[in-house]
Image (cartoon, grey):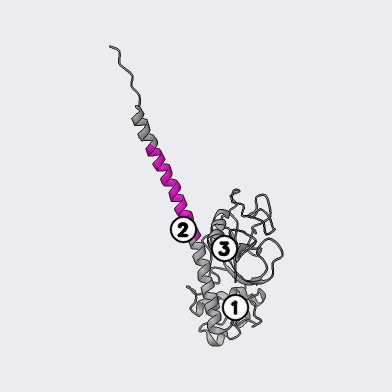
Amino acid sequence: MVQKQTGFTLIEIAIVLVIIGLLLGGVLKGQELITSARVRNLISQQDGVKAAFFGFQDRFRAFPGDYTGATANISGVATAACNGGNGDGDGRIETANNEYILAWEHMSKAGFIAGSYTCAASEGATTTPVNPYGMYLQVIYDGVYGGGSSPQRHNIKTGPQIPVGLMFQMDQKIDDGSPNTGTFQFSTFAAQGTAPTGGSGTACTSATAASGAWNTTNGNTNCGGASLL
């Protein structure tokens, strides 16, 4: 007796294809949701530091880290490694006297940011908050942002090691989507290990001019930005 060979029917094949499509769609949607959550986290972190910065300035009429009356007016501030806990009052949060690190002690002990930080000669887990990738944030007065010779001003740096795709989405949501213009720009973070680069090739940005764009196709995972204040 000859047995008749059977295969999948068109309906069965169609059902399998639909299931595969649903699984792939679910994976892609899940990845999209994770990316969106990371972007929101980065934006929320920047917004929180901005609120703390301006809140501190409004209360004490001085910048955190630069405030000359911190030890007298903020409980618990007394750091020998950072000019005794006071800034020099020149209106700039600088690397001198580690003011850019001292800023976190001033804001945390004044109750403007969560946690408690104590200034030291270098950034560390007890001195400085970190981004989701474990790299240190900075509040500083410098021109290390954008594509070229930028004017010095106060800015909040996200910290490096952030994928370029997240930086682009973040820039699109809070600014103009361009790494070298607007209130949120690319930053090289020369002080934190291997610095992100901008300008061409596998760099975070395609050009140093105002016409530059985030290099979203090269997959660079070591990028960062600065929110200008």
Q: Residue at x 50, y 79 (%)?
A: 109
| Mark 2 or mark 3: whose residue is earlier in sequence | 2
- The residue closer to the viewer here, 28 or 67, is 28
The mark closer to the camera, 1 or 3, is: 3
Q: Position of residue 90 (x, y in %)?
A: 66, 81
| Mark 1 or mark 3: whose residue is earlier in sequence | 1
Q: Residue furthest bottom?
A: 72
> What secondary structure is marked by label 1?
loop
Say which quarter of the image contains residue 15: top left
| Mark 1 or mark 2: whose residue is earlier in sequence | 2
Is residue 112 in view from this perspective? yes
Q: Position of residue 29 (x, y in %)?
A: 44, 49
> Where 70 falls versus 53 (above or below)?
below
Q: Residue furthest right?
A: 149
Q: Residue at x 61, y 73 (%)?
A: 100
The three-letter amino acid code for the residue at tag 2 is: Ala
On residue 211, the disc is none
Q: Position of residue 55 (x, y in %)?
A: 52, 78
> What secondary structure is marked by label 2?
helix
The three-letter amino acid code for the residue at tag 3 is: Asp
Say which quarter of the image contains residue 154: bottom right
User: Which stretch did the figure color magenta?
Assistant: 18-39
Q: CA distance from mark 2 to mark 3?
A: 18 Å
On residue 175, the disc is 3
Image quarter where the C terminus lies is bottom right
Image quarter where the N terminus lies is top left
- The residue closer to the viewer here, 36 or 72, is 36
Question: For residue 122: magenta?
Answer: no
Q: Is residue 26 left or right of residue 148?
A: left
Quickly name the residue at label 1: 65
> Where 213 falls versus 4 (above or below)?
below
On residue 37, the disc is 2
